Image (cartoon, grey):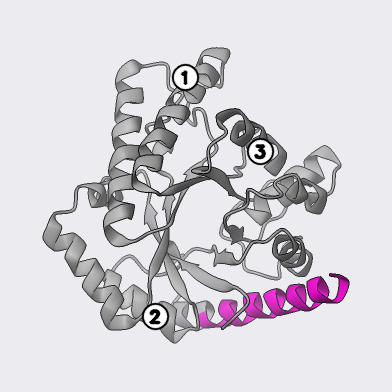
Amino acid sequence: MSEYILGLYEKSMPGFLTLEEKLSIAGECGFDYMELSIDETDEKLGRLKWTIDQRNALRNSIEKTGVPVYSICLSGHRKYPLGHPDAAVQKRSLEIMADAVDLAADIGIRIIQIAGYDVYYEDSTEESRENFGKNLAASVELAARKGVTLAFETMETEFINTVEKAAAWVKQIDSPYLQIYPDIGNITNAAVSYGTDFAEDLKTGRGHISAVHLKETVPGVFREMPFGTGHVDFDKACEVSLSLGSRMFVGEFWYTGEENWKEIICSNNEYLRTALENGWKRYRKHK
């Protein structure tokens, strides 16, 4: 049995593929599971209203391919944020959360990564932060009833761009069903901006890190960067994450129209596996 598992972000693959094809490719390229995307598009949000037959179809595809879906990246709240000043939007945000929890429970998904935004397209205010706290508490109650973990993604905005900021909310809510799901690229950018150490920031989440996104960045650029072209120290990130008890990792990158997209996916698996193995060896050496 491996000391850790590595998942593949769904949006690393072309949208014209079926979910079963995506699961198959994840397995063929050496990934252990796939992370499902529920973003702000109508197509992805529509997954939250899947019928029983549609849910069964995904379960059957998981069984057929042998590749599970262990997590959801729930970024649909960018359009319908928990902290929005409009009560109708807040209601919609909680509906999305409730539906995501139900979908996760039905499929057997363990973790829903939630975006660390109070608002996204609007300005953050004291009111938006208060709304966020209220609706976050309600969201955690929904998740607790189904035994599903919500976990903060560290984002590119000031609201929650560090593990330390996410940990403050986790401490405030004080529930086993709210944890942290750091994005290594984002916290590396934040550390450069603040003149701090991303590894020390990661350690502030000790005991509360449920999984880790492995993503490449450079200051000011937060997505769609090939691995090895940025400034993220993946060996160190893996070492520290493993030392904190994290055993679930996801390679986060995007399909952007490349003809050799499958080759890229398989190559990225090798890149991240090497970083994880290096991190594991360093962790064991100093344990």
Q: Tell which circle, 1 or 2, labels the residue nearer the N-terminal end.
A: 2
Q: Tell which circle, 1 or 3, labels the residue nearer the N-terminal end.
A: 1
Say left or right for 121 vs 276: left
In this view, 247 is above or below 82: below
Question: Camera-side residue: 98 or 221?
Answer: 98
- Image quadrant where one finds the C terminus: bottom right
Q: Which amino acid does label 1 sit on?
A: Asn
**Comparing labels 3 and 2, the label whose residue is closer to the camera:** 3
Q: Which amino acid does label 3 sit on?
A: Ala
**Image position, residue 82 (x, y; %):** 43, 28
Residue 273 colored in magenta in the image: yes
Which residue is pictured at 72% across the width and 58% down the height? 244
Say left or right for 139 vs 223: left
Which residue is pictured at 29% across the width and 20% down the height? 88
Q: In which quarter of the image is residue 246?
A: bottom right
Q: Which amino acid does label 2 sit on?
A: Ile
Which residue is pictured at 56% across the width and 60% down the height? 224
Q: Mark 3 points at which residue?
A: 167
Q: Do callouts 1 and 2 mark residues in contact (Cβ within 8 Å)?
A: no
Question: Camera-side residue: 256 or 180?
Answer: 180
The span picked out in magenta is 266-287
Q: Mark 2 points at which residue?
A: 25
Classify mark 3: helix, strand or loop. Answer: helix
Residue 151 colored in magenta in the image: no
> What is the crowding at mark 2: few (fewer than 14 residues within 10 Å), some, or many (at least 20)?
many
Q: Quadrant of residue 2?
A: bottom right
Q: Name the residue under label 1.
A: 131
